[in-house]
Image: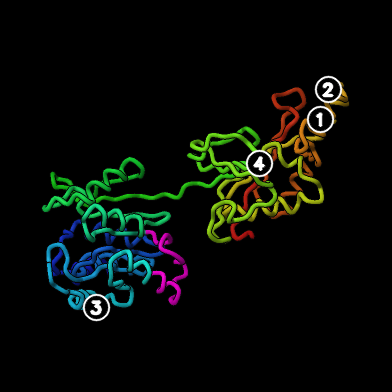
Amino acid sequence: MSLADAKKNAQGIESYVDDFEAEALYHAAKQAKRGIIEVGSFKGKSSIYLAQGSLDGNKVPVFCVDTWRDCDVHKGEDFFEEFKKNIEPYKDIIVPLRDRSEKAVLQFDEILAKETYSLLAKIADVDLVFIDGDHSPEAVRLDWELWKPREGVVFFHDVMGGPRGWEGPVKLFEELIKEYETYFVGPGLGKVANLGKVVIRSKKVRLNLGCGVDLKPKSEGWINIDSRKIEFDKEKYRFIQNDVGNLSYSLLGFEKMEDCKVDEILANDIIEHIGKWRIGTVVLVWKNCLRDGGTLTIRCPDIYEIARAYASNIIDGTEAARILYGEQDYPENTHRNGFDPKTIKRLLEQAGFIGISVLKAEAGGVDWKNMLITAVKGDGEK
């Protein structure tokens, strides 16, 4: 089966989606990996192209949302039976949800509770949405809010107004241009591109553990965590007062443990504050928060370099003690542990990290007393 099959099966079906737009939907559906939602299927032409693309790709379900009655341009008509007849070759992959969006979402949840779709647990898991339903401003915005994926592509029809000058999709797409990666999809050659494409990319989630006052911006995905109460600008930063060794998926804003997929953990000047009987467990907690391939970066004192500097009379005993045991100017600023390159690498290896790198400066160099360690969570690690 191929694009040619979609063209053949959709031939003669009344539609406001032209052939170029339908083919664009076919190619997008071919790339979908989790699920597809179409809002506004009419008589099924676009549904056929989406379903054919899915069959030629990863064979994900296509959920079609429509009332199939009394639409903007067909008042008083019911064309659900005509739709079902038209999509007959794709009945095993198309799932009709016959209602308005606000009620269809409930049907969607009920279906997911009964059927087994390995990569679908909720609406946000779909990765392709085509919105071409009620074109009123309120309805288009509601469709966007109800069906948009966590990560994926959303197509809007009539983003240039179309022959009837619909303002709903036009206004919303103009707003989305300011926030998302967007494209006008058209054949060129002076023809109007009336299909709008919005790309939603998942934002990285990063943890800045033991941040102190060195806060990192939430615009870059950072969640700053420290056991002390910190004054901060809520517009610029996200801060959680919490023990850095007691992290949970709910604390970080995830709905389920399996959703807890942190891209990066930064632990500067914190690991030396965690006692030796607890440190192994804490490092495992950090690893469990990371996605496969996620990175852990640690900066901590290198007790070998500190000892060498003291033995060489580069620093005196007071300075050596300050570096080794902390300033101790408040309760949390006391060091309870110490590492050299070998012991920090052993700790991370025991936790199951891979790709461990330890960079250190020679005594007397810039930041000579610290070492910088990076490690990666391997695929399939728990």
CA distance separating discs 1 and 3: 75 Å
Q: Amino acid at mark 3?
A: Glu
Count numbered badges in the picture.
4
CA distance separating discs 2 and 3: 82 Å
For label 4, the residue is 226
For label 2, the residue is 315
Image location of residue 110, percent across then percent down: 41, 73
First reached walking from the N terminus: tag 1 or tag 3: 3
Asked if the residues shown at circle 1 and circle 2 are in contact, with their CB atoms under 8 angstroms apart, the answer is yes
Q: In the image shown, does 165 or 53 lie closer to the viewer?
A: 165
Comparing marks 1 and 4, which lies closer to the viewer? 4
First reached walking from the N terminus: tag 4 or tag 2: 4
Q: Amino acid at mark 2?
A: Ile
CA distance separating discs 1 and 2: 8 Å
Task: Find numbered disc 4 in the image and state the secondary structure of the residue it sits on.
Answer: strand
CA distance separating discs 4 and 2: 30 Å
Asked if the residues shown at circle 1 and circle 4 are in contact, with their CB atoms under 8 angstroms apart, the answer is no
CA distance separating discs 1 and 4: 26 Å
For label 3, the residue is 88
Image location of residue 107, percent across then percent down: 36, 72
**Which residue lies at the image location 19% right of the left edge and 50% below the top edge?**
194
For label 1, the residue is 306
Quadrant in the picture for the C terminus: bottom right
CA distance separating discs 3 and 4: 58 Å
First reached walking from the N terminus: tag 2 or tag 3: 3
